[in-house]
Amino acid sequence: MKKWTFAVLTMALVLLLAACGNSSSTSNTATTGSTDTGTTETTETAAEPVTLKIGATINPHAQILEHVKPALEAEGVNLDIIEFTDYILPNTQLNEKELDANFFQHQPYLDDQNSKQGTDLVGVAKVHVEPFGAYSKKITSIDELQDGATVAIPNDPTNGGRALLLLEKQGLIKLKADAGITATVGDIEENSKNLEFIEIEAAALPRQLDEVDLALINTNYALEAGLVPTEDALFIEDADSPYANLLVTRQDNKDSDAIKKLVAALTSDDTKKFIEDEYKGSIVPAF
């Protein structure tokens, strides 16, 4: 009987020790799990690649963005470049947060659009100037422009005004003294050649060269049409034009790290060299 009692007590002691061992093991597992969770959290909070959706007209804006894309990837910023063929949708989609930024416009145009649309988009970097030029398939010199010739200009206020100012600088017209950068055809005071003005959407101007005597065309659309501004333009803006093209964002993201990295890439020495080498004076760095 004593032996039996002793055996039972021995078995109970073994079971008790086993239970304690399991408890210790469970405790250790919990501790290890806590450590693993901490490690996982550290990994998850590490900087993840960020994607920026940028709206841009095809040439040169999208090309310049493509150039800086590899450098930005190394910085943890992926560019999703959305190409546009007009000047309206890039601002609309940026304002509606379908884009993170856009790259196609100068400050006077941005100011005009903010005023008209009630938006508050902001330029965060000047990248380049696209000297505005006059083109023709019918004449090879401005001296050949005949009385009553047809002249096509952009139909948006800022680029239309820019075209008229350039024509005035060439002595072809004279504008009212207070016309400024948003001058319209109605602001023409003197028109000695009786030029007939046709206002057309900027993107469509190259296609009108067969129909008009002279067309004032934005450089990005001239390049898309295969024109070389420094060679094909009858006359062109000076390189010190105030119409620098901007990277534009919203107020809520203009100071984000990703946007700052994009600004740095677009205004780097490497990008400056790319613009100078690729466009050979048709586009001029503005930084």
Image (tube, rainbow, N blue to C red):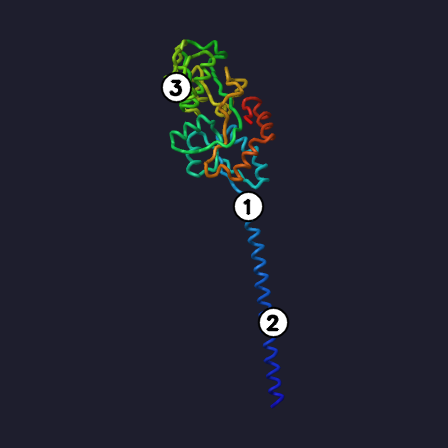
Find disc 2 in the rendering and name its residue.
21
Find disc 3 in the rendering and name its residue.
184
Q: Residues within 10 Å of mark 3 (few under 14, many from 20)?
A: many
Picture residue at 51% right of the left edge, 23% below the top: 130
Q: Residues within 10 Å of mark 2 (few under 14, many from 20)?
A: few
Q: Give the Cα distance between marks 2 and 1.
A: 42 Å
- Please name whichever residue, 232 or 109, is drawn nearer the observer in this view of the structure: 109
Picture residue at 48% right of the left edge, 9% below the top: 143
Picture residue at 43% right of the left edge, 28% below the top: 111
Quarter assignment of residue 116: top left
Identify which amino acid the numbered label 3 is placed on: Thr
Q: Which mark is residue 179?
A: none
Quadrant of the frame with the N terminus: bottom right
- The image position of residue 167, as x and y in percent, is 45, 15
- The image position of residue 7, as x and y in percent, is 62, 84
Are dots 1 and 3 in contact, CB under 8 Å? Answer: no
Instruction: Tell me the SS state at disc 1.
Output: loop
Whichever of callouts 2 and 1 sits on the residue coming sooner in the sequence is 2
Identify which amino acid the numbered label 2 is placed on: Gly
- Please name whichever residue, 280 or 245, is drawn nearer the observer in this view of the structure: 245
- The image position of residue 45, as x and y in percent, is 55, 49
Identify which amino acid the numbered label 1 is placed on: Glu
Q: Give the Cα distance between marks 3 and 2.
A: 90 Å
Q: Which mark is residue 48?
A: 1
Q: Give the Cα distance between marks 1 and 3.
A: 49 Å
Q: Can you see residue 243? A: yes
Direction from residue 110 to residue 48 in the image, left or right = right
Of the two numbered discs 2 and 1 in the rendering, the one whose residue sits closer to the viewer:
2
Quarter assignment of residue 267: top right
11 is higher (above) or lower (below) than 255: below
Whichever of callouts 1 and 3 sits on the residue coming sooner in the sequence is 1
